[in-house]
Image (tube, rainbow, N blue to C red):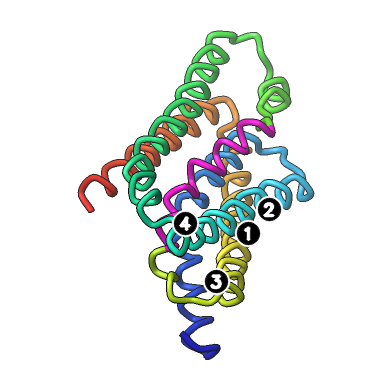
Amino acid sequence: MEWNFLFFFNSILLGFGLAMDAFSVSLANGLTEPQMKNSRMTLISGVYAVFQFLMPMAGWVLVTRAASYFSKVQKLIPWISLALLSYIGGKMLLEGIQRIRKPQESEEEVKSTIVLGFGTLLVQGIATSIDALSVGFTIADYSAVMALAATMLIGAVTWIICYVGLAIGKRFGTKLSRYAMEAGGVILIGIGIEIFVSHMIG
């Protein structure tokens, strides 16, 4: 691969493809936290972007340095994604149901208690980007510098897409704040199932 338009175009397209899961999770996060500030949206999008940058780069290293080990890890990717997203989504769903059973709670109280913890954010980042390890196969013939450039582009595209997802989720979350936790939980579980099924079929 050479430094040309095709290299940058392919990297950007790859970024769009890989960021779709993170975009869906961003929608759910924006939905469950409608009062999210711009600085927090920037941070959350940045976390997803960092993981989407690191995973393909890690995949490139594994493919070029330890291909046999990577082939074993790759088989676990759909199971790990399903487990992590199902856990987070299930937890959100249960918390949302418990919250609905408290009719005395005002809308402002509901909004103030829905905050995405940093630990949960990290787990989401891993769950939505772990399948990007396989991108290491597609860029195996890249030099280290080109692989770094490609994964940085993937990270940048992910940041933009996730920020947009958070903004869209926030807009609808303001109107649906009381049922946002359940909706977000269902979305995350659905994403986990989609990742699992697509890997099994593929």
Residue 51: x and y, percent? 59, 51
Residue 7 vs residue 95, the one in the foreground: 7
The answer to which of marks 2 and 4 sits earlier in the sequence is 2
Residue 193: x and y, percent? 33, 37
Residue 60: x and y, percent? 48, 63
**Type of amino acid at the residue the image marks with label 3:** Ala
Q: Mark 3 points at which residue?
A: 147
Q: Residue at x 46, y 77 (%)?
A: 10
Q: Which residue is drawn at 59% across and 10% down?
A: 103
In terms of secondary structure, where does tag 2 sit? helix
Query: Label 4: how many residues lie within 10 Å, few (<14), some (14-19) or many (20+)?
Result: many
Q: Name the residue under label 4.
A: 62
Distance Cα–Cα, label 4 vs label 3: 13 Å
Residue 36 vs residue 87, the one in the foreground: 87
Q: Nearer the observer, disc 3 or disc 2?
A: 3
Q: Nearer the observer, disc 4 or disc 1?
A: 4
Magenta segment boundaries in residue numbering: 118-136
Q: Residue 46 carries which label?
A: 2
